[in-house]
Amino acid sequence: MAETLPELKTGKASKKTGNTTKNRKRKRASGGKASSKDGVELLRQAVNKRLVRDSEVLADAISEKARNGDLASTKTMVGLAAGKKPLPDLEKTRSAMRFVQRLANEPQWQGKEEEEEEV
């Protein structure tokens, strides 16, 4: 059976101030709530580092399997090679620029100029 230890006494009367950690709410070190994605993001970053480190070895393994006739490895190699295509140059037009260009293309005003009215 478990033995209970006698309570230690220092001889001094302890004064309870209410400032124990039991009574206070603990604060997070980061200062905010932990997100459920933190662990997933950390795992993704760790896997990314290992992919960078082991990329040559992995590419050699996939290539060897593809040369031996493994169709899935061949598709993987083709997919990886085709996945990083340069993005086509997109015309970046803003609605304000289109408005300014439309105004610039209009013919100049041919009517009377506005005269300042004297009051």
Image: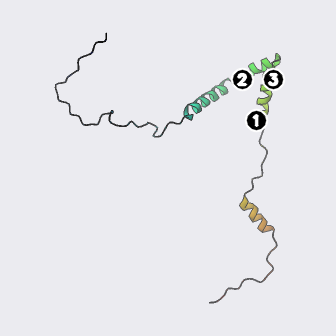
Which residue: 82% across, 73% down? 107
- Cα distance, mark 2 to mark 1? 17 Å
Circles 2 and 1: CB atoms closer than 8 Å: no
- The x and y percentages for residue 15 are 20, 33
Disc 3 packing (10 Å; few <14; some 14–19; many ≥20): some
Disc 2, SS: helix
User: Which quadrant does the N terminus fall into?
Assistant: top left
Q: Residue furthest bottom?
A: 119
Query: Mark 3 or 2 closer to N-term?
Result: 2
Query: As shown in the figure, which amino acid type bears the numbered disc 3?
Result: Thr
The disc, 1 or 3, on the residue closer to the chain's N-terminal end is 3
As helix, strand or loop, the secondary structure at mark 3 comes to: helix
Residue 55 circle label: none
Residue closer to the observer: 39 or 67: 39
Count residues near mark 1 (Cα–Cα under 10 Å), then give few for <14, some for 14-19, many for 20+. Answer: few
Place of residue 102 in the rendered image (x, y in percent of width and height, measured from the top left) = 78, 65
Residue at position x 79%, y 44% in the image: 88
Circle on res. 56: 2
Q: What amino acid is labelled 2 in the image?
A: Glu
Of the image marks 2 and 1, the number of the one nearer the N terminus: 2
Q: CA distance from mark 1 to mark 3?
A: 17 Å
Q: Which residue is mark 1?
A: 84
Disc nearest the viewer among 3 and 2 = 3
Image spot of residue 80 (x, y percent): 76, 30
User: Which quadrant of the view contains residue 39?
Assistant: top right
Seen in the picture, residue 109 relative to 103 is either above or below; the reply is below
- Between residues 78 and 35, which one lies in front from this camera angle? 35
Query: How many angstroms separate mark 3 from mark 2 (CA)?
Result: 16 Å
Q: Mark 3 sits on what residue?
A: 74
- Circle 2 residues within 10 Å: few <14, some 14–19, many ≥20: few
Judged from the image, the secondary structure of the residue bearing numbered disc 1 is loop
* Quadrant position of the C terminus in the picture: bottom right
